[in-house]
Amino acid sequence: MVRIGVLALQGGFEAHARVYAALGVNVVEVRRVVQLRDIDGLVLPGGESTTLLKLMEDEPWFEALSDFHADGKALFATCAGAILLAREVLDSGQRALGLLDASIRRNAFGRQIDSFEADLALDGEREPLRAVFIRAPRFTATGPDVEVLARLDDEPVLVLQDNILAATFHPELTADPRIHCRFLDLAAGLERPVAERATGVAAG
């Protein structure tokens, strides 16, 4: 069975873990670099990116995550997690892993008070996806190998590049598990996403 880890240093990791637990997936909260050895995919949750970077100073997280990606294992980043993976964080000089060929701007949709929800057309799906945006970043540019899976007003908000899935919104805050199912299949190396076969049905 595929084993999914959720980076549990800071932010909304518990909500992601609950989604996978409800799907019957073997999920573990990851707090130490050594735990990366035992998982097939890692969720990088939303939160405060600068705080997360500070917490990551205690261990060689950047090197470990780069090796994790190089080994072909899957990464799923939401909101602040997407900032961490980008090749460039605009207007901040903030350090990032550079694994996702995209430029990103922090808090580009406004402050907490400007949070909103929207229905998105999801690539390969008939039913729209309800998305929650909270202090969301914005992809300002994406490279040629980045596939856009969903847009908001023509702007990419969900992208796929090789073994990386990244969203600027919070799929863990709705009852729709399709994005989590897609990542589950990405981690398993399957060609067709679970969500195309069984929307809202437990996977694993």
Image: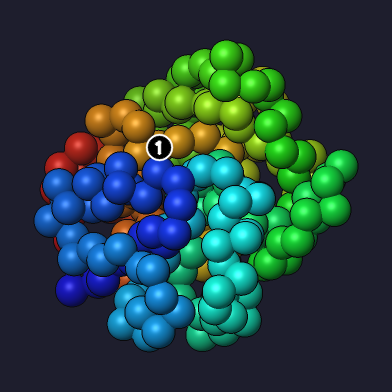
Q: Position of residue 55 (x, y in %)?
A: 55, 62
Residue at point 23%, 38% (across, down) = 199
Which quarter of the rendering shows the N terminus?
A: bottom left
* Side of 76 where 55 appears, left or right: right
8, 87: nearer the viewer: 8
Q: Amino acid at mark 1?
A: Pro
Residue 149 visible to the viewer: no
Q: Quadrant of residue 98?
A: bottom right
Q: Position of residue 198 (x, y in %)?
A: 20, 44
Residue at point 31%, 82% (across, down) = 38
Q: Compared with residue 24, is residue 47 higher up or lower down, i.e. above or below?
A: above
Q: Colour scheme of this structure image?
A: rainbow
Residue 125 visible to the viewer: yes
Residue at point 32%, 29% (across, down) = 174
Q: How many marks?
A: 1
Q: Position of residue 127 (x, y in %)?
A: 35, 26
Which quarter of the rendering shows the C terminus?
A: bottom left
Q: Compared with residue 161, is residue 151 higher up or lower down, i.e. above or below?
A: above
Classify 10 Å Cα crowding around label 1: few (below 14), some (14-19), many (20 and above): many
Residue at point 15%, 42% (across, down) = 201
- Dot 1: what SS? helix
Q: Compared with residue 108, is residue 201 higher up or lower down, i.e. above or below?
A: below
Q: Position of residue 40 (x, y in %)?
A: 35, 75
Q: Quadrant of residue 192?
A: bottom left
In this figure, which residue is indicated by the disc labeled 1? 171
